[in-house]
Image (cartoon, rainbow, N blue to C red):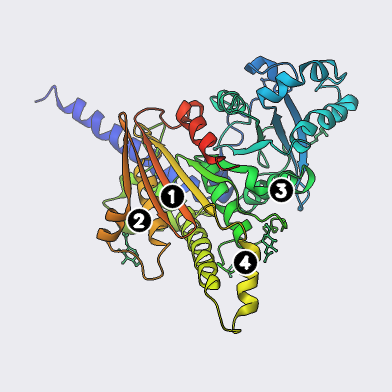
Amino acid sequence: MVALSPIIKKAYWTLAGVGAVYIIFLSALSNTWIQRHALYAHKLFSGWWVNYARPEAFGFASKQVTPFNVSTPDGEILSAWHVLSLDTYGQNEQEILESKSSPIDEDEEFSSIASNLRFLSDDPRARLVIDLHGNAGHVAQGWRTASYLSLTALPKTHVLALDYRGYGHSTGSPTEAGLITDGIALVNYAIDTLHVPASRIILLGQSLGTAVVSAVALSFADPDNSTGLIPTGVEKGVMNLEGTDFASVILIAPFTSMPDLMGSYRIAGIIPILSSLRPYPRIQSFFRRMIVDTWETESRLKALVSLVSHKHKGIAYHASFDGEEDYEAMVQLDIAHNKSSRPKLNLKLIHARNDYNISPRNSGQLLRITANATSFEGLSNFQFESRKEVIKKGDGTLERFVADGVRIEFELLPYGGHNRIVSFADVAICVNKGFQGL
Ligand SMILES: *[C@@H]1O[C@H](CO)[C@@H](O)[C@H](O)[C@H]1NC(C)=O
Ligand SMILES: *[C@@H]1O[C@H](CO)[C@@H](O)[C@H](O)[C@H]1NC(C)=O
Ligand SMILES: *[C@@H]1O[C@H](CO)[C@@H](O)[C@H](O)[C@H]1NC(C)=O
Ligand SMILES: *[C@@H]1O[C@H](CO)[C@@H](O)[C@H](O)[C@H]1NC(C)=O
């Protein structure tokens, strides 16, 4: 007994110490500046020691990657990568290699942009993946480059990847409205400057990028902010006669909202943020309310699906229309959703079972919520379960829900974790399918 007591005392003080550090940690997060640095981690692995002006170091072919800048309406300069499709590269190898430019020589850089982005903008068969990454790091961080390599090996498929404000070589610092503005700026650049129609573009995001992609997709579907879910300060996406229905919207390892995520998130799968406060719901909700950028993906996807499917119902109604009332409104719907044969929204959620940062339950929840949004009255549990198709794929599963103009799929992979999944063949297959019908 006597010998034990110092050990117990020590254990007690150690526990008290850990508790105190945790409280200090949470209090520090109540500071907006610290909170944003923790959430966006844009200064973490920001990679000043890697020269990603030399993409060959990451396994790309010589001049396959063109670094270029996109400017935002609010004055930031974002650095981005264009990764050439490998078959386009093969067909034009001589010309590409002989182009005199070197990506790190500033004066000549422009000619390199002009020549290589031309292969994307001049080719009517080109397919484009706009790839928005997760938090921390930069375009060339971790498995991201492996994913561009696997995607550009698909037929005629190019990748545009972006460093949001405050990341990599981009100016500014991240906020929710800022990142959404950046995503829209890149999509606008593709549609407006490079003339790639939305129907040949897939929006793909991973982790934090899924929250950005969801908001960007909603901004294009809801340019007038009728849903009230576009944050203050976000500029409109361009309107385009070809329509703003993207070929697909693919979300890898998405989460329902930032406050929900913080309730279950563990840093590196170990250190809890708010989950250890679960026995104290009032304290937990106090800290939840302090989260400044709430990234309400669940509400945004729900609004997106309900907008698209209700507009689609408008068209079905128009086909048997014989009055004159609401004719103008119907024509407007018709213009917005002219190509009615394809689903207007192809939404795909991909999650690994062994994702220890963001649980795949998030994707399950998003499937249920978005499927429910296809119905005015809402679906009962039974209706949802019975209309859902479940397909076994090896050790994984694919759940599919199809309704008016909308196809939603949730693919659960047995492996892939939180980050490596982006480089998996299943993602490339999904992108390839996402372009089908072109
Ligand atoms: C991109 O912008 C940075 C400044 O943020 C500048 O140093 C660089 O030269 C620009 N690159 C191109 C291709 O314009
Ligand atoms: C969208 O609507 C919400 C709610 O009315 C508003 O707070 C927000 O500022 C609006 N966003 C834009 C870009 O106008
Ligand atoms: C729909 O598209 C067809 C051709 O694809 C065009 O002729 C028709 O005018 C379009 N309808 C509307 C309302 O724009
Ligand atoms: C759909 O939404 C309604 C109304 O919010 C809710 O009562 C119902 O349980 C939801 N259905 C599913 C399958 O989640």
Residue 334's disc number: 4
Q: Residues within 10 Å of mark 1 (few under 14, many from 20)?
A: many
Q: Disc 4 and disc 1: Cα gap in Å?
A: 23 Å
- Would you place residue 156 above or below residue 404 in this image? above
Please state if 267 lies on the left or on the right of 142 as rendered: left
Residue drawn 67% across the image and 51% down it: 181
Question: Which label's residue is closer to the chain start, 3 or 2?
Answer: 3
* Residue type, label 3: Ala
Question: Which label's residue is closer to the chain start, 4 or 1?
Answer: 4
Q: Whole-percent x and y of residue 2?
A: 11, 24
Q: Do the residues labelled 4 and 1 touch (CB within 8 Å)?
A: no
Tell which tag, 4 or 1, sits nearer the viewer. 4
Q: Disc 4 and disc 2: Cα gap in Å?
A: 50 Å
Residue 338's disc number: none
Element at label 3 = helix
* Residue type, label 4: Asp
Q: Name the residue under label 2.
A: 283
Please state if 357 lies on the left or on the right of 234 as rendered: left
Q: Write down the quadrant of residue 284 in the picture.
A: bottom left
- Would you place residue 292 above or below residue 131 in this image? below
Q: Name the residue under label 3.
A: 185
**Residue lying farthest to the left in this orientation:** 1
Tell which tag, 4 or 2, sits nearer the viewer. 4
Residue drawn 64% across the image and 54% down it: 244
Q: Residues within 10 Å of mark 4 (few under 14, many from 20)?
A: some
Q: Is mark 4 within 8 Å of ligand 3?
A: yes
